[in-house]
Amino acid sequence: MYRSRKFAFILLLFVFIQCKNNNESTLKKVSNNEIKHAKGLSISTKDNYSVVEVSSPWPNSKKKFLYILKKKNAIIPVEYKNVPQIQVPIKNIVLTSTTHIPSLEMLGEESKLVGFPNLNYISSEKVRNLIDSGKIKELGSNQTLNTEVLINLQPDIIMGYGLDNSNPILDNLEKNGLKVILNGDWNEQSPLGKVEWIKLFGVLFGKEKQANAIFSTIENSYNETLKLVENTTKKPSVLSGSMYENTWYLPQGESWGAKFISNAKANYLWKHTKGTGSLALSFEKVYSEAKNADIWFIDQYVSMEEIKNANPHYSEFKAFKTNAIYSFSKKKGKTGGVIYYELAPNRPDLVLKDLVKIFHPELLPNYQLYFFEKLK
């Protein structure tokens, strides 16, 4: 699935497809949860099967969805007879979000991807090679998934999203016997919570140990970077975003992006605002509060000249005058997809290192920025 790039603030506000699982379960919460950071996912391993609960498939959802991922010859208790059951390890999968491509690639399962909407947005070189060889089918767009192609593919799983409780396309696919599983990783606000959803892919592909090891490596890398800035007292002030259709969009103070900035020991100027989405402010309001910001993150421009041409008043900001503007939009895949949108949720350790390098370069003297680039 392609995430909207029109909102001009750091670390993206995702726009997701709507989907519905007609087999919502009212069973009690999964016990012995093996998940540490993700708030919307629970996994409990039993004898030859796992119980998976997705409790936050969309913002403020009061619904919870259970899935039984069962291995060969598994005996499933009668209490789960009305819960969707998926045979694992799966042989193939349809994804609807570019952010799930890295999970497949890290597990060495990218060849199991058989369909995706709008293939041009995929940046992974390995997956692009599969696309070029005709092994992954184009499914149109998330709003108008090609039902005929999907039914012909007969994938073991279609991994979908929910913005609310309505999506007739996915309902129709389920009525035709296809299995849909919701993934709510986009709704996580903890950087480590998002990446921990790789454990769901681990269960689906029978690679639980590998998924756990990958997550632990990323978690340790993230925590080691946190230790680097533990005693840092200097906190540069930070502005993000730019104008889009007469409105300046910025992440709210409890959002994923704001948490990264806080963890990297910088002063996000809207850190005290409540909410996990975006703020919509006037130029005058932003200018009055952030004209002297030390660092500015921007995502829809790739040069200082382009910024100035878009709005001459941008040059009045201190960050513009001191050449302290950074963007992730310059680094793209073969067909133009921004690499950050695909990979960043899966590699929060690299995002954090980038920010620490920008805010406190003396702490990572030999580190080269992975996602971000200072604009010239």
Image: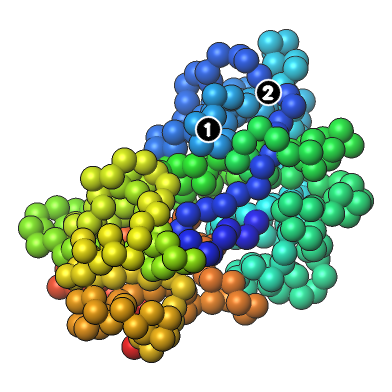
The answer to whether 349 appears left or right of 179 in the picture is left
Task: Give the residue displayed 88% in from the left and 54% down from the top.
Answer: 149
Q: Which dot marks residue 102?
A: none
Question: Whole-percent x and y of residue 198?
Answer: 53, 46
Q: Earlier in the sequence, mark 2 or mark 1?
A: 2
Count of all numbered marks drawn on residues in the image:
2
Helix, strand or loop status at disc 1: loop
Taking depth in this image into account, of 198 and 259 the one nearest to the observer is 259
Q: Which dot marks residue 24?
A: 2
How dense is the environment of label 2, judged by Cα within 10 Å: few (below 14), some, or many (20 and up)?
Answer: some
Q: Quadrant of residue 19?
A: top right
- Residue that badge 1 annotates: 56
Helix, strand or loop status at disc 2: loop
Question: Whole-percent x and y of residue 286?
Answer: 28, 62
Question: Whole-percent x and y of residue 86?
Answer: 74, 33
Q: Amino acid at mark 1?
A: Ser
Quadrant occupied by the C terminus: bottom left
How dense is the environment of label 1, judged by Cα within 10 Å: few (below 14), some, or many (20 and up)?
Answer: many
Question: Whole-percent x and y of residue 338?
Answer: 53, 71
Q: Amino acid at mark 2?
A: Glu
Task: Give the residue displayed 47% in from the left and 26% down from the top.
Answer: 33
Task: Give the residue displayed 34% in from the left and 83% down from the top.
Answer: 312
| Above or below 140: residue 279 | above
